[in-house]
Image: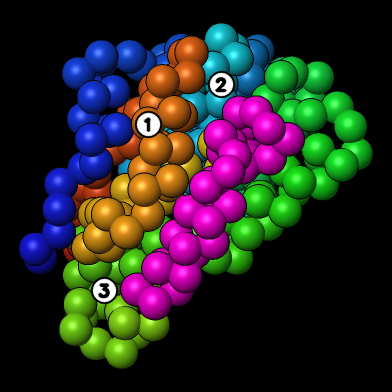
Amino acid sequence: MGLRRRSRVRRSSRRRGRRPRGGLTKLTAGSLDQAVTQLRLYDYAASANCYKVRLLLAQLGRDYERVAIDIFDGDTLTDAFEQLNPHRSTPVLQLEDGRVLVESNAILWYLGVGTPFLPGDAFGQAEVARWLVYEQTDVMPMIGGLRFRLITGRLDPEGEAAEARRGGAHEALTIIDGHLRDRPFLAAGRYTIADIAVFAYSHVAEEAGIDTSPYPAFRAWLERIAAQPGFVDDLEPYPPNASVLAGRSTYG
Ligand SMILES: N[C@@H](CCC(=O)N[C@@H](CS)C(=O)NCC(=O)O)C(=O)O
């Protein structure tokens, strides 16, 4: 498909071989009913929305149980999963008391409260919220959506739909790069969940065929994030069953 391999940030973290805390359990028929004894993350290893949460949990040093959801083997299509999350998406975080949180950025917020990853003041929080919203409306659909569809054969790289997302991806990178020209991080002058959320899909933009060389402030920010204490990059490549027509999922 002519896509570049993973970015330098990813390769260097791989070399370091750091892994998030917490074991990996496969989803079984009974998993959803099992009593929760610690934080439980329903997780798809190749999802950058899930990676966001794994990164924050690692940087917080929190232990958690990781339940593997194979979204291309129909795991999110079951009635049991729908009960857990009517959106049928990952990540899902289940708290020690059994309550359930969905939406990756809501989960980041919940975990970030009372930690250095979320400012305590209203203005700082609003700045963070701005980037959490922008990540979902622009960064994820344009960069993440383009990458997913190209890698898994759901888009013709030369077609109009790919071109529209490519344009959106460059627009997002232009905004991010411009914002970072005179700031080290996206919000509140320090590393926060805003950086984690936007990093998740943007750091693999080159895998969507996006040349990031016109965005030097963005690239320097990627390096700054990779240098943060406890940083991990365990985002997995899409497995073969993610390819179009190979598996069963809400994506067809
Ligand atoms: N807005 C949601 C998006 C989550 C999402 O799209 N998750 C994908 C993986 S990246 C998923 O689990 N899809 C499962 C499916 O549609 O079956 C979030 O940020 O949590």
Residue 167 picture location, percent across and down: 39, 77
Badge 2, how many Cα within 10 Å: few under 14, some, many 20+?
many
Q: Residue furthest front?
A: 182
Are circles 2 and 3 on residues that touch, CB within 8 Å?
A: no
Residue 164 picture location, percent across and down: 39, 82
Q: Label 2 to label 1, Cα distance in Å?
A: 20 Å
Q: Which residue occupies 58% across, 52% down?
A: 179
**Between 216 and 81, which is closer to the camera in this rendering?**
216
Amino acid found under the numbered disc labelled 3 = Arg
Amino acid found under the numbered disc labelled 1 = Glu
Task: Find out whether residue 139 is within the magenta segment.
Answer: no
Checking the image for residue 223, the label placed there is 1
The image quarter in which residue 220 lies: top left
The reply to whether residue 180 is in sight is yes
Task: Find out whether residue 185 is within the magenta segment.
Answer: yes
Are circles 3 and 1 on residues that touch, CB within 8 Å?
A: no
Checking the image for residue 93, the label placed there is none
Q: Which residue occupies 37% across, 54% down?
A: 215
Q: Which residue is mark 2?
A: 57
Chain part drawn in magenta? 166-195
Q: Which residue is mark 3?
A: 154
> Which badge, 3 or 1, comes first in the chain's sequence?
3
